[in-house]
Image (cartoon, rainbow, N blue to C red):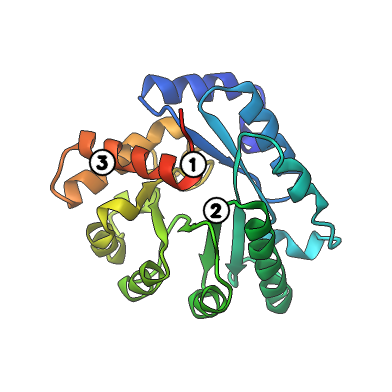
Amino acid sequence: MDEQYDGIRDEIVENAKKNSVLYMANIGYNKETSVKAVEDAKKYDGVYAVVGIHPENVDDLDDDFKFIYELAKEPKVVAVGEIGLDYHYGGDAAKQKEIFVKQIQIANELGKPVVIHSRDADMDMLKILKENKIENGFVMHCFSSSTEVLKEVLKLGAYVSLAGPVTFKNARSLIDVAKLIPEDRLLIETDAPYLAPEPFRGKRNEAAYVVHTAQKIADLRECSLEKIAEITTRNAKRFYKIES
């Protein structure tokens, strides 16, 4: 959980559970936040950790990936991420690609799935995914690309995760995406503390709000909220290999 939740982590987890959000993947974006994600996973039931280096943080990297190997030994570390490419906010593109590929290799060595971030970089992202097999599955985190990109990542075996933007009035392409994701590949998330769904848009996001994203997806797919909750929970537990 982001530093914005310092001092209120107990409340955030409790709010989530009151809203029937029983499993949470807490994602690091550098060494410090990955360590914190593991600490939170150890403390809270139903909270799991994902560790890695976000593309916005590659310029700060000293080429020391040892922390990923060390943290991945913890039983509640369920994936490597969030990794990938960001040509909007990220640093040097060549270095982003290099570190993206290196972390894919690390995930393969560790037997972990991968959480992928892609912003304004879909073609390079697809090229890397086609040239570097991810052996234990991957999810396109906070998907915001076109239906054409959706079809390409699905061919590669991707899970696809939707966040608050699918509830926004200007969602447009995400409406089609939400309808097209196969039932067994659909995941939902917060991307907290960012991208809170309607009716909380512009506020600090939290896990409890994911129910609003789920309801919007249920409306778009013309099914019940209960069905979306059931299939996304089942898919998340399968993807992250959560047995409880």
- Determine the residue positioned at 50% across, 27% down: 46
Mark in the foreground, 1 or 3:
1
Q: Mark 3 points at which residue?
A: 228
For the residues bearing labels 1 and 3, Cβ distance under 8 angstroms: no
Q: Which amino acid does label 3 sit on?
A: Ile
Q: Nearer the viewer, residue 207 or 102?
A: 102
Spot occupied by residue 54 in the image (x, y as percentages of width and height): 65, 57
Determine whether, in the image, residue 12 is placed left or right of residue 34.
Answer: left
Residue 241, which numbered label?
Answer: 1
Verify CB contact (< 8 Å) between mark 1 and mark 2. Answer: yes
Picture quarter with the N terminus: top right
Is there CB contact under 8 Å for labels 3 and 2? no
What amino acid type should be assigned to the residue bearing mark 1? Lys
Q: Can residue 96 be seen in this view?
A: yes
Going from the N terminus, do you reach mark 1 or mark 2 first? Answer: 2
Query: Within the image, what quadrant is residue 41 found in?
Result: top right
Crowd rating for badge 1 (residues with CA inside 10 Å; few <14, some 14–19, many 20+): few
Q: Residue 176 carries which label?
A: none
